[in-house]
Image (cartoon, grey):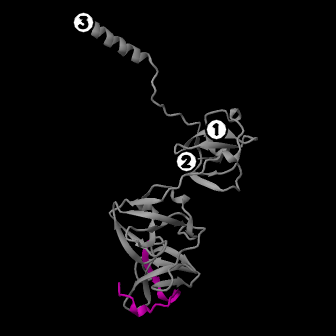
Amino acid sequence: MKRVLTLLTLGMMLIGLALPSTAQVPQPADAVVNTPFLNMRVAPDPTSARIAVLPAGTPMRLVARDAAGRWVQGVLNTGVSGWVNASFLLVFVNINALPIGIPSQVVPPPTLTGLATVNTGAQNVRSGPAANFSIIDRLRRGDVVTLVGRNGDARWVQVVTSSGVNGWMSARYLLPNIAIVNLPVTSPTGVTPGFVEPVPSGGTAGIVTASALNVRLGPGVHFRSIARLTRGTGVNLSGRNAAGNWLLVQLADGRTGWVNASFISTSFPISNLPVRG
């Protein structure tokens, strides 16, 4: 009897091995994004609404094309579907073999609340999108914020903290659950060339009045220059020397240095600044 049971067990095991597996095997990508960032749109037209911005290397399945084969409809691993320009893809299938699709087949993206986690020991929340704005809150590693928007060059993010503080944080110290570039632009400013530089209003802000102004390591012309500012550049006033003819300033990128007070326009009384050197 035991021998019969053993034979039956072995037989069932062999039959199980012969049956095809019902486990789902991930489908290989038909294409991947081959440019730093690629817009996915609701229709095969560069003027149509944007669904998402895809970073380089994003995989997708291709399900359709336009009549000319210049645009393809892709489906992401998240299920989001839209149209992308085929010239910015590394394609592994024959595009001309795809059926011609229509924009009405587009699946709208799911609603996703933008969240981010602080990834550094301590991080400042500021009143504006640059390091020369005042600090209004401080967060610690692991704190979660809600993403509201971004500045023009996507280096600063507008957030709301768990305590309800609405402010700005440097994007480099956040781990977001969505691409920062997909957030709405709530401040058209930036610290990189080509954007309007963010300048605080009132407070200890100052504006450069010279056509070119050196920022130095110390309060005097004998100190080495570390930066050169142009007329209209905004700075944050951090201090002064005893004579009040040199000012310690913070630039929009966070660096600090000294400038000649004669070339800074400010409504803040210089004598009220702390003596720093």
Disc number for residue 56: 2
> Where, by quadrant of the figure, is residue 98 drawn?
top right
Whether residue 199 sits left or right of residue 248 in the image: it is right
Please identify, in this view, whether the residue under mark 3 or under mark 2 is nearer the observer.
3
Give, as a single range, the part of the protein colored magenta: 254-276
Residue where numbered disc 3 is placed: 1
Classify mark 2: residues with Cα within 10 Å, few (<14), some (14-19) or many (20+). Answer: some
Q: Is residue 180 left or right of residue 223?
A: right
Q: Secondary structure under badge 3?
A: loop
Label 3 near label 1: C-beta < 8 Å?
no
**Proximity of marks 1 and 2: CB atoms separated by less than 8 Å:** no
Foreground residue, 43 or 158? 43
Numbered-mark total = 3
Point out the residue furthest to the left here: 2
Which secondary structure lies at badge 1? strand
Query: x%, y% of residue 236?
Result: 46, 80
Indicate whether residue 3 is drawn in magenta.
no
Residue designated by label 1? 63
Q: Nearer the viewer, mark 1 or mark 3?
A: 3
If you read the primary sequence from the N terminus, does the residue marked by circle 3 or circle 2 appear first?
A: 3
Image quadrant containing the N terminus = top left
Label 3 crowd (10 A; few <14 / some 14-19 / many >=20): few
- Residue drawn at x 45%, y 67% is 159
User: Which sits earlier in the primary sequence, circle 1 or circle 2?
Assistant: 2
Quadrant in which residue 188 is drawn: bottom right
